[in-house]
C-alpha cells in the first residue's frame, strides 16, 4: 500500500508537470491525499482528469452567485481554488448551485477545507451523491464506490448553521449528574491540599 506521503508527493509533481504553479500543485497534493485518507478515489480521478486536461476548454468562476452556469464545464481545480479563497464571503449566500463540473470529486476537498475556514459544516450534493463535511475532520457520505466520476450535472452546496445535536433537557440532566463528582470542602481537606500546611520547608 502506498503511503499518504508518497501520494502527496507524486500528485504534487504530476500537477506541476501539467503546467500548474508549485503553490497550486502543493494544494492538489494535499487534497488528493485527503480523498484517499477518507476512502474516496482521489488518485483514479486526478489521473484520468490529467489525461484530458489539455484537450478540453474547462472554465473557472471568479465570482460566485446563488446559481452558477458555465458554457462548457468547470475545471474542478481552478473552481476549487476560487471557492476556497472566497469561502468566507460565499458562506453569506447560505446555499449555491453549480452546474456542469468535470471530475467533481477533485473539487470536494476544497469544500471540506472551506468548512474548517468558515467554522461551519457544509452539505455537498453531487447529483445524487451526498457528502456532509465536518470542519475538514471527517466526511459522512452515501457514496461508497471507488469509481471515477467524470462529470456532475448539478452540484448543490449548503452552509449549515452550528447547533447542538442534543436538547437542553439532555444537557441539564447530564450536568446534574456530573455534579456528583464534586466533593464538599472541609477543614480536613483544606489542610491536605498543596500549600495549605503551616510548615515552611525552604
Image (cartoon, rainbow, N blue to C red):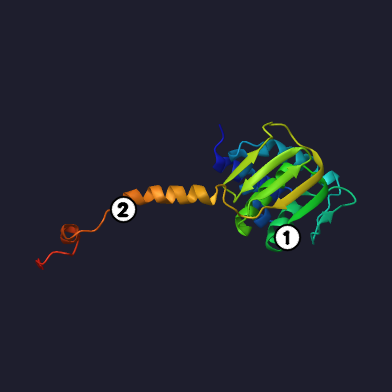
Judging depth in this view, the residue of 167 and 124 nearest the camera is 167
Relative horizontal placement of residue 127, taking residue 31 as reference (left or right)? right
Instruction: Kindly identify the residue that appears in the image at 24 percent across and 58 percent down.
Output: 185
Sequence-first disc among 2 and 1: 1
Residue position marked by numbered label 1 in the rendering:
90
Residue toward you, 148 or 177: 177
User: Is residue 74 in view from this perspective?
Assistant: no
User: Percent x, y for residue 84?
Assistant: 69, 57
Q: Residue at x 78, y 46 (%)?
A: 155
- Against 10, residue 20 (above or below) is below
Residue 187 x, y percent position in the rendering: 17, 61
Position of residue 47 measured from the top left corner of the image (x, y, whole percent): 72, 39
Cα separation, mark 2 vs mark 1, equals 46 Å
Q: Which residue is mark 2?
A: 182
- Counting other residues with Cα less than 10 Å from the Cα at mark 1, is it few (<14), some (14-19), or many (20 or more)? many
Q: Check disc 1 and report its element: helix, strand or loop.
A: helix
**In which quadrant is the C terminus drawn?**
bottom left
When asked about the image quadrant of residue 88, the answer is: bottom right
Q: Secondary structure at mark 2?
A: loop
Amino acid at each position: 500500500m502506498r503511503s499518504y506521503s508518497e501520494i502527496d508527493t507524486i500528485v504534487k509533481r504530476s500537477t506541476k508537470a501539467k503546467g500548474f504553479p508549485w503553490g497550486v500543485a502543493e494544494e492538489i497534493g494535499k487534497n488528493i491525499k485527503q480523498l484517499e485518507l477518507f476512502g474516496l478515489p482521489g488518485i483514479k480521478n486526478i489521473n484520468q482528469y490529467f489525461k484530458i486536461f489539455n484537450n478540453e476548454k474547462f472554465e473557472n468562476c471568479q465570482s460566485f452567485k446563488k446559481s452558477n452556469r458555465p458554457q462548457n464545464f468547470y475545471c474542478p481545480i481552478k473552481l476549487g481554488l476560487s471557492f476556497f479563497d472566497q469561502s468566507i464571503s460565499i458562506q453569506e449566500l447560505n446555499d449555491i448551485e453549480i452546474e456542469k463540473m468535470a471530475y467533481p470529486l477533485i473539487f470536494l476537498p476544497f469544500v471540506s477545507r472551506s468548512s474548517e475556514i468558515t467554522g461551519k459544516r457544509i452539505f455537498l450534493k453531487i447529483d445524487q451523491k451526498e457528502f456532509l463535511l465536518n470542519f475538514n475532520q471527517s466526511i459522512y457520505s452515501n457514496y461508497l464506490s471507488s469509481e471515477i466520476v467524470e462529470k456532475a450535472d448539478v452540484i448543490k452546496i449548503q452552509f449549515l448553521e452550528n447547533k447542538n445535536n442534543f436538547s437542553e433537557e439532555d444537557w441539564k440532566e447530564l450536568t446534574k449528574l456530573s455534579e456528583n463528582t464534586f466533593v464538599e470542602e472541609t477543614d480536613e481537606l483544606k489542610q491536605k491540599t498543596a500549600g495549605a500546611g503551616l510548615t515552611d520547608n525552604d
